[in-house]
Amino acid sequence: MKNQSEDNADSPAESKPHYTMKNEIGSDEPNVNEKAAPVAETTEHGVAQPEVNQCEIILPPEDTGGKTEAAAPDSGEVSGPAAMASPGGIRALILAARKDPDKVTPLLTAKKEVVEVLVHKTPPKHLFWRARTDAEPLYFDLLQLRGDGMSEAFYLIASDELARELKENQYFTKFVHSYRLVLIIDPKGSYAWWPVRCDSESSWHESAQEIAMRLESAWGRVQAGHQKYDFLPSGDDLGEPDWPKEDDLGLLEKAFKTRLITSMDHPVLNELRGKKL
């Protein structure tokens, strides 16, 4: 009678995959955790086919009847969020927002004698300044916000239509006004825009217009006097200012690229009318 071991020896051995890996001392041991790589299926012609993801659906190309749809011509115009993203778009918006000098009638049309005494919060009171003479004055509608302390922020309104709508709205009428933007520079070459309001008969605003014109030809400080701003000239001749080579539009871009209101949905407008942010 054959024992069980002899039966096993006579039966054919089952073919099982055997995987080995080298251990640290070089011996071969089965690796029970390693999985065999997937084997590509072979067709009846003997060509291996790649494994197909069962969840992938490949649609045939749409039948257009032999016709191809022509691409829309590129007009070159930038609109929507792209207009705000590109420097060229911001420049175009600023150009469109600039008011026609012929349609603006400043209340102050001639220079007046200015009393030379005291200080204004903008330009900074401890510095002397000069103002650049513009070939054409730069008039814009701006929204002015006062922050903590005496800090202020100005937002440029991107069109006359939007500015009119804001001026007629009870939530914004006290914040939107017309200004002349004056480029000023100190003796060290630091420059900034000075928004000088031009739609008010206030003695403060009229005196600011006077001083802006005075600074075109002389160095001076702007100081607060009695119900108006006063001009204080420099003690010495500080020479001619070294104006930036960049044109006005480029400087306006840098000043208002993050403070440009193009629609009624601007976050600043929503905050002023009490909408949830």
Image (cartoon, grey):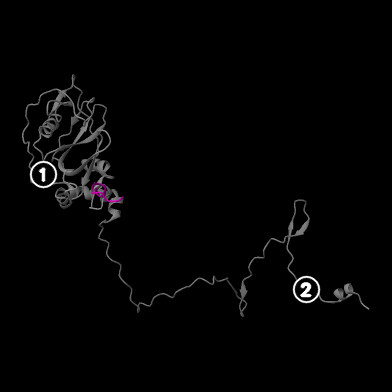
The earlier-in-sequence mark between 1 and 2 is 2
Q: Amino acid at mark 1?
A: Pro
Q: Position of residue 70 (x, y in %)?
A: 30, 70
Kind of element beneath mark 2: loop
Q: Which residue corresponds to mark 2?
A: 14
Numbered badge on residue 101: 1
Q: Residue at x 7, y 26 (%)?
A: 113
Q: CA distance from mark 1 to mark 2?
A: 98 Å
Q: Residue at x 26, y 47 (%)?
A: 271
Q: Position of residue 114 (x, y in %)?
A: 9, 26
Q: Position of residue 111 (x, y in %)?
A: 7, 31
In the picture, the quarter occupied by the N terminus is bottom right
Q: Count the labels in the image.
A: 2
Q: What is the crowding at mark 2: few (fewer than 14 residues within 10 Å), some, or many (at least 20)?
A: few
Say which quarter of the image contains residue 59.
bottom left
Between residues 68 and 189, which one lies in front from this camera angle? 189
Task: Give the extent of the magenta segment.
Answer: 269-277
Q: Is residue 202 left or right of residue 28?
A: left
Kind of element beneath mark 1: helix
